[in-house]
Amino acid sequence: MVLVDNHAGKDGAEDGNLVDFRGNPVDKSKTGGWLAAGLILGTELSERVCVMGISMNLVTYLVGDLHLPSSKSANIVTNFMGTLNLLGLLGGFLADAKLGRYLTVAIFASIAALGVTLLTLATSIPSMKPPECNPRKGGHCIEASGQLLALLYTALYILALGGGGIKSNVSGFGSDQFDSSDPKENKSMIYFFNRFYFCISLGSLFAVTVLVYLQDNVGRAWGYGISAGTMVLGVAVLIGGTTLYRFKKPQGSPLTIIWRVLLLAWRKRKLTYPSDPGFLNEYHNAKVPHTHMLRCLDKAAILDDSAAANEDSKSPWIVSTVTEVEEVKMVLKLIPIWSTCILFWTVYSQMNTFTIEQATFMNRKVGNFAVPAEKSLTTPKESQAFRELELDYYSLLLVW
């Protein structure tokens, strides 16, 4: 986050912010370092295997086994992935405000393990699927009903909740195992993030090759079952290393500061600006220089007469500091940059839906080996509509 830490010094260990599992100041010789960080990397590896192994070809299960329309199946997949990413905000807020990163990761990893276990059950119990059919031979396919989909939806969104909590905290918890004020540990922290992204790539590679192959050729329940076992193992490894970790105390969420500044600026919108910015609350002690952009937010730092008469006049819910106001300005200035990612992720999301469905119509054989893309998905009517749409698309390209 951009927000400046108002409660800690340059190094969290200097003010007792980092503690061991008993709440005592950390002993660097017994806690943190690569052993602790490696266990945390194992949790991230498990999360990637679990989420990617499920989301990568979930659309083929929805269309091929549950006989749902392609459009509805694509919506289910994209809604699941979108919810997972949005719930990262909830996980980050809980970790910063109350639980701390370790508890948040441990709790949400357990939730993710429960979700993928339920999903394994939903895909392995015969009664949870409609009767098999072959639309290419004129068979009538019965679409899965609401009751059959209930367990599937429950499992997916439990997994989304757990994955969101892991995603927003695991990298920060790993970096807590290194002291940034120590040159040697600070260098190790840089390597940690390299290894962190290596684990993400490794887990994704395993999921989209080995697990997808197992789902196609052995059984979907096997692929999801391995994902569930991997997640359970990741939780066990994380909890097993409890005595080795360095824990950072919760210091309040930046989201709270943003909400508070916006609320106070709205409440004080009718107040007049002071003749000099120096009259704003904590102007001369600000950690961030005052700026004139988004000046309307400065009103949150005005200490009006009614607030000044209050015994608790310096309460953050009565008046904000210039530092807090400037931090919120920084975040708001980033919104135009963040918004440019919308188009990218709109296209990227097609990898798990349209691209996989497209692959089912392609020649995927390399010698005697068929690259996994699941069996044929659509009914003849849907297949014809899909091909017509594809022809229209290429015709437009030629005209252009």
Image (cartoon, rainbow, N blue to C red):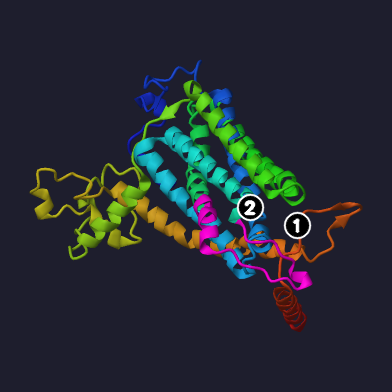
> Mark 2 and mark 1: span between their CA atoms?
23 Å
Among all residues in the image, which is located at the extreme bottom? 399
How busy is the neighbourhood of tag 2: few (under 14 within 10 Å), some, or many (20 plus)?
Answer: few
Answer whether residue 53 is magenta in the image: no
Element type where label 1 sits in the image = loop
- Residue bearing the label numbered 2: 126
Relative vertical location of residue 372 with respect to residue 226 in this rendering, above or below: below
Residue 355 % position (x, y): 70, 63
On residue 275, the disc is: none
For label 1, the residue is 373
What residue is shown at x 43% (from left), y 58% (from top)? Answer: 333
- The amino acid marked with disc number 2 is Pro
Left or right: 390 in relation to 265:
right
Q: Amino acid at mark 1?
A: Ala
Label 2 or label 1, whichever lies nearer to me, is 2
> Who is closer to the viewer here, 341 or 121?
121
* Residue span colored magenta: 129-156
Q: Position of residue 202 (x, y in %)?
A: 69, 40
Q: Secondary structure at mark 2?
A: helix
Q: Is residue 396 above or below residue 270?
A: below
